[in-house]
Image (tube, coloured by chain):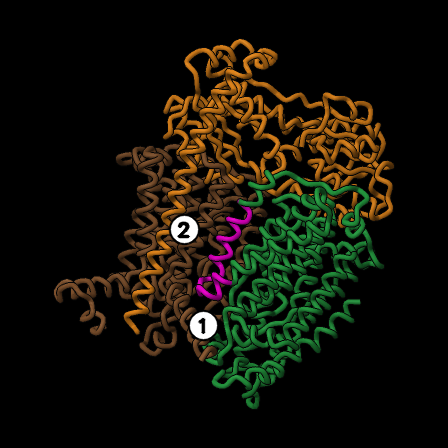
Chain colours: A green, B brown, C orange
Amino acid sequence: MSDGGGSGSGSGVKAPPTLETAAVDTAPGVPQSNGMIGGADEQSQSAVILEWLAERGIFLFTTALVLIAAVFVDGFASLDNITDVFNRAAPIGIVAVGMTFVVISANYLDLSVVAQVATAAVVLIGVGNEAGIPVAMLVALLIALIYGLVNGVAVGVFKANAVIVTLATTFIGLGVLRWASGGSIYFGPQDSLIRRFGTTEIGPFPLSMIALIVIALILQFVLNRTTFGFTVKAYGSNREATRLAGINTAWVVIGAFTLSAIGAMIGGFVLAPYTNTAVSAMSDGFDFEALAAIIVGGTSVFGGRGSVLRTLLGVVFVSVLTNIMVLSGLGFGYQQMAIGALIVLAVSVDALARKAVSS
Amino acid sequence: MTGSSTITPSGAGATDLVSRLRTVLARRTEGRALALLVVVAIGTIIFEPVAFTSYEVTLGRIALIGLVALGLTAVILMGELDLSVASTLALTGVVMASIDNLVLGILAALVVGLLIGAANAFFVVVVGINSFIATLGMLFFLRGLGFVVSDEQPVRIADVDAGIAFGKPLIGGLTPRMLIFIAVFVLMQIFTTRVRVGREFYAVGGNRQAARDAGIPVRRRIFTGFMISGFVAALAGVINTLERTAADPTAGSTVLLSSFAAAIIGGILLTGGRGSVFGTLLGATSLGILQVALTLSAVQVDVQNIIIGAVLLIAVITDPNSLRAVVGSVRSWLRGRSVATT
Amino acid sequence: MQDQSRRSRWWLMGLALFVAGSLFAACGDDEGDSTATDDTTATDDTTATDDTTAADDSASDDGDAAASGDGEFEVFALLPQGNDQPYGTTYLPPMQAKADELGINLTITNSQYDADKQASECETAVAANPDLIILWPAVGDTVRPCLEAANDAGIPVTVTNSDVNPEDQDLTEAYSGPDTYGQGVASAELMCEFAAGEEIGIIMINGLTGNSTAIDREAGFEDTINEQCPNVEILARQPGNWNKDESQIAASEMITAVGAENIQGVYAADDTMVAGAIDALKARDIDPSTLIVTSIGNTFLGNPLVVSGELDGTVFQSSSWDGEHAITVAHEILTNNPDERLVEFMPSVKVTAENADAPEVAPEW
């Protein structure tokens, strides 16, 4: 099953460079953004191998990890456990695929997803109990659009640093949420649509995981086949050139942050039904965990280069790793160490490969 | 430039002074921090004078926010980031408390801080990873290591009395924490303005290729910067552990974001090359006074967060570059409109 | 052209500063307003609720004194949580109501479990020189300097929710709150009782890693199991971080790790997490009522589970008791200043199917 997803992503990974160059070529004055194309004649054997590794790194890592776990970790290869991995992956994954656009636009990350996920979850259940789910979803969507607009305008129009802007909106957003909700924990009714969404599984797939896959496919399409997607990449690799090409860069940034906000909203929409509860503290740590998945997936934090399906694989990888460590009875400390080491390792391979290629 | 000064109605000498003042001001980056500080200080004097009469408390809060931020400044000036400072603070505290001999413990903690800085720099300089990612990995790794070393529990230091004595005022109401903070500030200020190595940080952050061409050993400078950041974070870990008489593996949860906030409010450009240690001090000072005043006046914590968030947002979008960008885009928009209408 | 651009830049700068300034002015006004309203509500309440005070046990005779006599006390409450956690959310209102009733002006801080932040807030509190400080330690091991500073300044300190270490207790005047270690003990006693001497294996879900309440409860539970019923074996343990979703996944994974057939019981450090574990069991088509499940809390989430039989037993922690007694104990110290350290433990009422409907154990959070 992970094979299917893997080969899909393989082709997805191959596609962007050509498409991107095509897009970039139409914009005069935009320099080649991707160091991996061209100048390949003098590559040494090891450089070729390293590059090949880096290109498919996350896919190979994930496959290897899954195979090793299936053989050596008791209970890993059971349907129930695969469901657990997916339950781990789905909410954070939906947040991460949305945030991928912010990272590709060379804006580091969106810290405010912490506030956004919690807000969407609390609104879905809190407002949903009072006024019905459609109204709640509409309110949540409105809030997500506000987040996207505020973050996007501050970063895109005011050219302010995204880390600080989203840090500020996190403070404000969590403050408002706690002030408005009083910090209470909200429960959904036992037999509601929300509850059923959270408990239904198709084979080993919880509905949230299916949502993640569908959203990832849609966003991959947006990134690779739409003008907006091309522009985000072009902007991420060279801002000034994109601006000179006559593209309204403010809208690119606002769009990226809005996609991130909508991803975070849907993340909240699948997190709340899973437990049928919502509380403002439920999404602590989502900011850096989502970023970790994006980076492990191989999206460059320099911007311009990346893929939504790779982020999806990154999320699966981190979830599998955490799952294995819990199955093996390792504590929280070791889990954090492993994730940290993994981030550095994954990116080191990528960096060394690019160095070898360019030298 | 000259065109504008002849148009202005006031006398030539005055305009000369004004324009010279303007150029000086334009080169300084601390303007917003200063404005914020003035607003905060006036507000505090009116509503919560206690924050000034018991200055040692406010100073303590400033030192708590500002110490890590001072170290961070060295890294940010070079256009790099260090997300691992909070985890470094927690881990070094645990290392120190785990060693029974106080002096040995402190030394070990500081060495660990230097090693962490060196490891960060290794990944950035030698392997070639973006510092944002390298230190993000270290953030997780070091926090995990802190939990493993401490067995997931607070560790009390062996000599509790020494710790309590350390928290007592030494000279005129100033505790060792504040004196160390002041010392670190002075050293960093001298280092970045008077010492060649420190001044070169600006060149490394401003234009790395140009710095390399000018013969500046960029790699070594980056190593120095990260080791300063790691060392100062370790110093903060040591001070916190001593003052609290125990190390907490969960420590520093609010450190990372508040030290970034202090540096940014202080006018330091995250892309490097611009800013000053003095700016960081101003940023930390205004944040510290603001926090103490809000606490004293019993503002609800959630509302405090909203206020601090709003201050951050205003600080970051009133950057001169930001305003110029807005003016630019408004003008190009207007031009687009006029072209469309004609 | 250039001149224009510069002028507009300055103009914009001025506008931005004005916005910033007005924001500060606004929050300054807020401060003024909030203290002003606090004052009036406090005095209103003290006069209005005099009769109800008489109903309360310990505060009855002092309540009148406060209302009629020299008036208000300034008290700082240094808490590690507030509206960011469900418990804090239901702890604060009863605390504030009691304070209003007894004529106590409360200033509340929230350190978000950051010991260094709480220490700094403690310094601020000492500088403000209140009549008393109520402390809920963020990390128990780190509060001694704060206590000494308050002592030096002659400010009495009472402790709420989690007691300080035994060697630090002589620096404090009182403690009220649950016995967090004792709650772990009580939950373990329930587990032992239901196990009735049989050899069983259980999985354990703990609170946030490194959090003092989590550490105390884990220790209380484990020590008691080892002493009273070694027939119960803890097969696996993971943190659930006080979260339902994290607990649910961790529980499910532990079931995979040790095998469903080996598990006859589940312990979780609070009801939110045990609800997650019960959902995990159900998702595996395991009937939770066939297992021995215990936890701590008796919350809105846990109580119905006890009634339905899925949760066999929990230990009642009343947030309103906790919040109110923080104030009544502080008031007792302020007005009577007893010689002995005053300790009021929240009764660790065990809640099982027999008494889950009783009004005394109606859930609060």
- Neighbor class of circle 1 (other Cα within 10 Å; few <14, some 14-19, many 20+) is few
Residue under label 1 = B333
- Between residue A165 and residue C318, name the one nearer to us: A165
Quarter occupied by the C terminus of chain C: top right
Is A341 placed above or below B65 here? below
Q: Residue furthest bottom?
A: A41
Left or right: C36 in relation to B282: right
Residue visible at 45% across and 33% down in the picture = C34
Three-letter code for the amino acid on which mark 1 is drawn: Trp
Residue C113 appears in view: yes
In percent of width and height, residue A195 lies at 78, 47
Residue C251: percent from the left, percent from the top?
75, 45
Residue indicated by mark 2: B68
Per the rendering, the mark at residue B104 is none
Residue C106 in percent (x, y) is at 47, 27
Q: Are marks 2 and 1 in contact (CB under 8 Å)?
A: no
Q: Is residue B245 visible?
A: no
Residue located at (48% from left, 23% from top): C42
Q: Any magenta on residue A71?
A: no
Chain of the residue where label 1 is placed in the rendered structure: B
Q: Secondary structure at mark 2?
A: helix
> Disc 2 to disc 1, how far (Cα)?
42 Å
Q: Mark 1 falls on what kind of element?
A: helix
Rendered image quadrant of residue C204: top right
Numbered range of the magenta stretch: A153-175
Kind of residue at badge 2: Val
Give left or right: position of C257 versus B90: right
